[in-house]
Image (tube, helix red, strand yellow):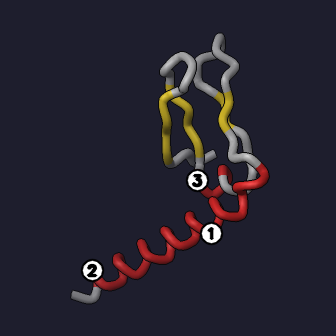
Amino acid sequence: MPYQQQLPCPHCHSVILFDAKLFVSGMRFCCSNPDCHTSISISPSNLEKAKHLVEDFESKKQKILQHSHSH
C-alpha cells in the first residue's frame, strides 16, 4: 500500500502512515507502534466534506503542475 502522508500518533507520538485518498474513503489507519492500538479515521458525518477537499486540492495541484511545465 503506497502511503503518502504521515501524522504523529496523538497517544504515543509514533508515526501513523496513511493515504489521503483511502482516508477520505472512510478507511481507518493504525499507529505503527504495535503496543499502542490507536487508530485514526474521519467521522462518517465529515467524509463527504473531506473527500471534496482532497479532490479540490488534487485538482489545484494538477493545474499548478501543468502551468509550471508549460513555462
- Camera-nearest label, 1 or 2: 1
Report which quarter residue 49 is drawn in: bottom right
Q: In the image, is 30 to the left or to the right of 64? A: right
Q: Residue at x 58, y 70 (%)?
A: 55
Q: In the image, is 27 to the left or to the right of 8? A: right
First of labels 1, 2 by sequence position: 1
Q: Amino acid at mark 3?
A: Ala
Measure the C-alpha gap from mark 2 to mark 3.
24 Å
Q: Position of residue 45 (x, y in %)?
A: 76, 54
Could you tell me which secondary element the residue under label 2 belongs to? helix
Q: Residue at x 57, y 19 (%)?
A: 11
Q: Position of residue 6 (x, y in %)?
A: 49, 39
Say few, some or many: other residues with alpha carbon within 10 Å of mark 3 (under 14 / 14 to 19 / 20 or more). Answer: some
Could you tell me which secondary element the residue under label 3 belongs to? helix
Could you tell me which secondary element the residue under label 1 belongs to? helix
Report which quarter residue 66 is drawn in: bottom left
Mark 2 and mark 1 in contact (Cβ < 8 Å)?
no
- Check disc 1 and report the residue beneath it: 52
Say few, some or many: other residues with alpha carbon within 10 Å of mark 1 (under 14 / 14 to 19 / 20 or more). Answer: few
Q: Position of residue 2 (x, y in %)?
A: 58, 48
Disc number for residue 20: 3
Measure the C-alpha gap from mark 1 to mark 2.
24 Å
Q: Residue furthest bottom?
A: 70
Q: Position of residue 42 (x, y in %)?
A: 69, 46
Q: Amino acid at mark 1?
A: His
